[in-house]
Amino acid sequence: MSNAKKIGVLAMQGAFHKHCEMIERLGHFSCQVRTSEDLLTCDALIIPGGESTVMSKLITRNNLLDIIIHRANNGMPIFGTCAGLILLASNVVAFELPLLRLLDVTVERNAYGRQLESFEANLEIKGMTEPLRGIFIRAPKIIHLSDEVEVLAAFDGDPVLVRQGNILGATFHPELTDDTRVHEFFLSMLAQ
């Protein structure tokens, strides 16, 4: 594919390989990002789910915090799912570790409950004609957002897919389904 892009996936924890598979299914190149040098070669970045405390510490230890913020401020699209959304948030309830603060939302971690309370739900997503199956695993809840943040999908009245400029965040795991539409939407942000 001549216009294929190189999409970085933060590869420190979580199901990052599922995002890599999705990107490659869509005809682009995936790059596992572990260092700032890795990130510098990418056109966009996905921050996957995982454990937000561990991920925050690893991002800091690997000197990625400032470079991610710099690249985002210079227009690079970034997509965070579940823990990735938590790390993108401007504020997280009862969380004292460094955040990227690129998405003007307040998030509550594990708001739907622990692993046993994980669930799936059909989601109506703005611009998509058919519902998308959302998989929620120890999912965070967006409890506040600024007027700058666009809600693309909600579940029980709470935002679950949001966008602010070049930043996209999902409280669910689109990479764990065969449905490529959320990733396609993210990739379309590269052309905007």
Image: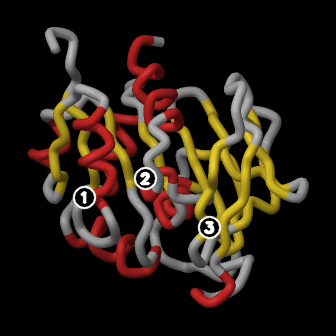
State how far apart marks 3 and 2 are (Cα).
Answer: 11 Å
Residue at the extreme right of the image, as rendered: 157
Whichever of callouts 1 and 2 sits on the residue coming sooner in the sequence is 1
Q: Judging from the image, what secondary structure is the residue with disc 1 in?
A: helix
- Type of amino acid under label 1: His
Q: Is residue 128 above or below residue 142?
A: above
- Type of amino acid under label 3: Phe
Name the one closer to the observer, 78 or 30: 30
State how far apart marks 1 and 2 are (Cα).
Answer: 9 Å
Q: Is residue 95 above or below residue 2?
A: below
Instruction: Report the residue marked by disc 1.
Output: 17
Q: Residues within 10 Å of mark 3 (few under 14, many from 20)?
A: many
Number of numbered discs on residues: 3
- Type of amino acid under label 2: Glu
The quadrant where residue 34 appears? bottom left
Instruction: Report the residue marked by disc 3.
Output: 136
Query: Residue 6 location, x and y as percent?
Result: 19, 30
Residue at the location (16% across, 14% down)?
A: 1
Whichever of callouts 3 and 2 sits on the residue coming sooner in the sequence is 3
Q: Is residue 177 left or right of residue 104?
A: left
State how far apart marks 3 and 1 are (Cα).
Answer: 18 Å
Instruction: Report the residue marked by disc 2.
Output: 175
Residue at the location (52% across, 37% down)?
A: 182
